[in-house]
Amino acid sequence: MRHEYWPVFVELIVTPFKHAELIWGIVPLYFGWLLNELTSDKTSFRTAIQTGFGFLWAGAHWTCQHFGVRPVGALRWDFNALLAVNILVTLFVLFIGAAALVSGLRRKYPRYCSFLGQTRFSNYFMITIFPLQSNYLPWSWVRVTAIAVFAVPIWLAFHFGFKPLRK
């Protein structure tokens, strides 16, 4: 079975901007991604702070949506496996965000966790899963595949596109 992934990918990027209540959550992720791309390729505590803030911001937004009033246009919560996926992803993002932020502020990584300072491209994944986690689009394998298919081309474009601006 063959799918056209470009329209699915565009849908993931455009959906947050169609709903005003999602804009305050997605725009800081774009700024965080831009800031991360302008920093050095090397592991740094500054990047860990930026990544931690972005992850905590997204996780807080999703947590508010889990427990808040559902806006018009959002899908209804069903108590099924997808709710478990949303909650697990939210908890994972909050945990990694807190670990990265604390590591950056303390200027010390936990053992085997220095990767927290080199997560420049993590905001791409936060941005693409944002409408899924916000429950404005349902999780599906086609959407997950579209995220994976475009990860490398987007990374290459940003890596080489911003390379002249990095120190």
Image (tube, rainbow, N blue to C red):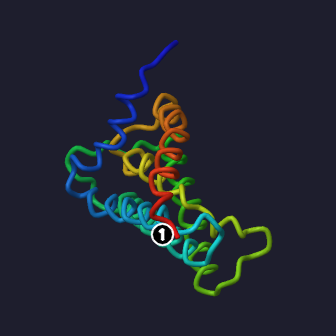
Q: Residue at x 42, y 52 (%)?
A: 127
62 or 41, which lies in front? 41
Residue found at the far front of this picture: 164
Residue found at the far top of this picture: 1
From the viewer's perspective, is 26 left or right of 72?
A: right
Residue found at the far right of this picture: 111
Q: Residue at x 54, y 66 (%)?
A: 94
Count every numbered label the image shows and give the total. 1
x and y percentages locating residue 161 in the rendered image? 45, 51
From the viewer's perspective, is 76 left or right of 43?
A: left
Residue 121 vs 57, above or below: the answer is above
x and y percentages locating residue 158 in the rendered image? 47, 51
User: For the residue marked with disc 1, what is the amino acid?
Assistant: Leu
From the viewer's perspective, is 41 left or right of 18?
A: right
27 or 96, which lies in front? 27
x and y percentages locating residue 87 in the rendered image? 52, 54
Q: Secondary structure at mark 1?
A: helix
Q: Residue at x 50, y 58 (%)?
A: 163
- Mark 1 packing: few (<14 Cα in 10 Å), some, or many (20+)? many
Residue 110 vs 128, above or below: the answer is below
Residue 90 vs 73, above or below: the answer is below
x and y percentages locating residue 122 in the rendered image? 54, 56
83 or 90, which lies in front? 90
Residue 133 vs 100, above or below: the answer is above
Q: Quadrant of residue 27?
A: bottom left
The residue indicated by pointer 1 is 56
